[in-house]
Amino acid sequence: MEHTVKDKYAKMVRVYKRLEKISTDNGQKISNTEAKDAAEEFFNQCYHLKDFFKKDASILVNGNVIEEYINNDPNLSLAADYCNTFKHAGLNRRPRSGKIIEKINTHIYFHHPTDKGISNLSRIEFKVDGKSYDVFDVATECLKAWNNFLKSNNLQNIIDLV
């Protein structure tokens, strides 16, 4: 079975777009569980993109370089911690970000009326060492970080395919 960075990256972008819709304008639909599920799935896809770099034979990037990149990027390291917190029912080793996720809150907003009629959105906030982070904002920065990694490793074609 073939496991390509291109396919995993495309899936991450699709999940990001679903998170974006929930976070900015989900129309008449509203759900706090949908936002939580989309956030968890995005960070799962985002963090595990690293595994596809390591296994895609067409990509010549050292696995240690990828791990170091994640560890050195504040948003990707938060994504790793978020992903692993849910995957393992809490972190069982030192967090990549060096910080502990303390709490996750859902915020639901109702915008009535708008030029489209009704517009609802749901945002997830997580607290890390007393500081609040908006999940969609972190997800946006993670996508930018992966795009920068792809560009700096002459893999721009993967971004262009999506």
Image (cartoon, rainbow, N blue to C red):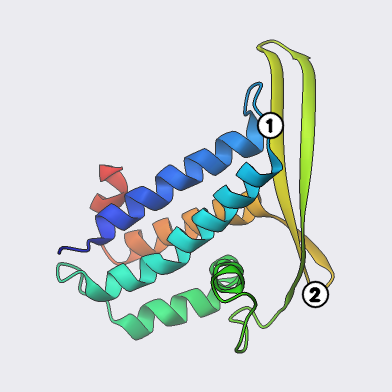
Q: What is the number of the mark on residue 129?
A: 2
Task: Name the residue at 64% across, 26% down.
Answer: 29
The secondary structure type at the circle numbered 2 is loop
Q: Decide if residue 140 is on the left or right side of residue 148.
A: right
Q: Position of residue 125 (x, y in %)?
A: 74, 54
Q: Decide if residue 112 is on the left or right side of residue 74.
A: right
Question: For the residues carrying marks 2 and 1, which lies nearer the camera in this image?
Answer: 1
87, above or below 133, in the image: below
Quadrant in the rendering for residue 118: top right
Could you give the CA–CA distance between mark 2 and mark 1, rounded to whole angstroms?
Answer: 29 Å
Label 2 Cα crowd, 10 Å radius (few <14 / some 14-19 / many 20+): few
The secondary structure type at the circle numbered 1 is loop
Please give the residue where the numbered disc 1 appears in the rendered image. Answer: 30
- Depth order, front residue of 88/41: 88
Q: Decide if residue 101 is on the left or right side of residue 46.
A: right
Inspect this view and state whether residue 156 appears: no
Q: Position of residue 97 (x, y in %)?
A: 63, 78
Of the two numbered discs 2 and 1 on the same chain, state the one appearing first in sequence: 1
Inspect this view and state whether residue 34 appears: yes
Quadrant in the rendering for residue 64: bottom left
Task: Name the residue at 61% across, 87% down.
Answer: 92
Indicate the quadrant containing the N terminus: top left, top right, bottom left or bottom right: bottom left
Q: Amino acid at mark 1?
A: Ile
